[in-house]
Image (spheres, rainbow, N blue to C red):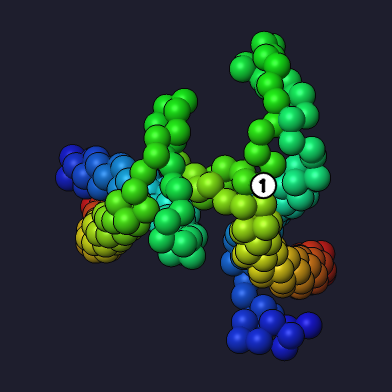
């Protein structure tokens, strides 16, 4: 088991140290899980933007729509240009893009996020394995200590 | 006993100082995380701006309105911001290094004081 963890000889740590390692690994697992959830939401948002950009292009010009002025007030409007869209680039910058460009843009963004999701998942799997290894060594040590105390 | 109480209160003072420093470390760490994510976002924007055609229309969201901006100006602003963030990161790194150094000295102080306390306790027991 320990050899899988590479440089860390878990068996050489005492119970207190193991508990510390266990705790910090648990925290890492938690924060990684949180990060991954956030990333997945961002990914979904971007993919739905991408899909919507595509759908929007299929709408006929002149089509009547309702524009939200606020959450509860809508005004009538007509589509007059279904070939371009304003795209949020981040930090307050927006750019007018053709729908194809917009799709490409969202594709790029999604790829960056997917990369991060993959990396995060890998790290999470690793940390989980580490956590399990530490827990099992810790249990063994505690059981041994108990046996010693009993005899 | 009087000297022991003095050492004890001194020790408590130093421990409290270290605790304060740890709070500062936490604050700086948060700043670093913030700066890092800002940097990432700005880098992404910079990259996207560089991919735009020269005549592309770029807008900046100011409050609830989009204001048209010159692409070159936007690029300039973003790279200025990246510079600013990078220098801020350097500043927090320096702060952190300094703080670690200080903590290290204080830790040594704590160990010395603890040793002193033990000595004094021993002497007290002998007397």
> Would residue A57 be found to the left or right of residue B26 on screen?
right
Q: Residue A61 falls in which quadrant of the image?
A: top right
Residue A102, above or below A128: above
- Position of residue A134 measured from the top left corner of the image (x, y, whole percent): 72, 70
Name the one closer to the observer, B43 or B34: B43
| Residue A76 appears in view | yes
Q: Residue B1 falls in which quadrant of the image?
A: top left
> Measuring 50% from the left and 48% from the top, which residue is drawn there?
A95
Name the one closer to the observer, A68 or B119: A68
> Would residue A31 be found to the left or right of residue A51 on screen?
left
> Would residue A6 be found to the left or right of residue B122 on screen?
right
- Position of residue A21 measured from the top left corner of the image (x, y, whole percent): 62, 65
> Would residue A101 be found to the left or right of residue B4 on screen?
right
> Measuring 49% from the left and 65% from the top, which residue is drawn there?
B51
> Measuring 71% from the left and 68% from the top, which residue is drawn there?
A118
Q: Determine which residue is flagged by label 1.
A: A83
| Residue B103 appears in view | no
Count of numbered marks: 1
- Position of residue B77 measured from the top left corner of the image (x, y, whole percent): 30, 51
- Secondary structure type for disc 1: loop
Instruction: Judge the density around disc 1: few (<14), some (14-19), many (≥20) Cα neighbours within 10 Å.
Output: some
Name the one closer to the observer, B2 or B12: B12
The chain letter under disc 1 is: A
> Measuring 57% from the left and 46% from the top, which residue is drawn there?
A87
- Position of residue A58 measured from the top left corner of the image (x, y, whole percent): 80, 45
């Amino acid at each position: 088991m320990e050899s899988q963890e590479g440089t860390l000889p878990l068996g050489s740590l005492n119970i207190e140290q193991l508990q510390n390692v266990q705790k910090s690994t648990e925290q890492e697992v938690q924060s990684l899980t949180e990060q991954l959830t956030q990333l997945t939401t961002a990914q979904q948002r971007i993919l739905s933007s991408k899909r919507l950009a595509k759908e929007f292009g299929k709408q006929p010009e002149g089509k009547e729509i309702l524009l939200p002025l606020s959450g509860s007030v809508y005004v009538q409007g007509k589509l007059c240009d279904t070939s371009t869209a304003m795209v949020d680039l981040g930090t307050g910058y927006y750019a007018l893009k053709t729908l194809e460009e917009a799709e490409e843009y969202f594709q790029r963004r999604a790829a960056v996020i997917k990369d991060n999701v993959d990396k995060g998942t890998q790290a999470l799997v690793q940390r989980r394995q580490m956590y399990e290894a530490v827990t099992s060594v810790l249990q063994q040590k505690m059981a041994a200590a108990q046996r010693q105390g009993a005899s | 006993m009087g000297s022991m109480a003095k050492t004890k209160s001194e020790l408590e003072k130093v421990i409290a100082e270290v605790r304060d420093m740890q709070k500062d470390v936490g604050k700086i760490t948060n700043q670093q995380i913030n700066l890092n994510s800002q940097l990432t976002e700005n880098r992404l924007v910079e990259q996207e701006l560089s991919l735009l055609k020269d005549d592309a229309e770029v807008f900046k969201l100011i409050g609830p309105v989009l204001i048209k901006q010159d692409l070159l100006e936007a690029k300039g602003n973003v790279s200025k911001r990246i510079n600013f963030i990078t220098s801020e990161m350097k500043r927090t790194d320096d702060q952190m290094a300094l703080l670690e150094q200080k903590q290290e000295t204080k830790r040594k102080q704590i160990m010395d004081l603890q040793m002193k306390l033990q000595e004094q306790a021993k002497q007290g027991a002998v007397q």
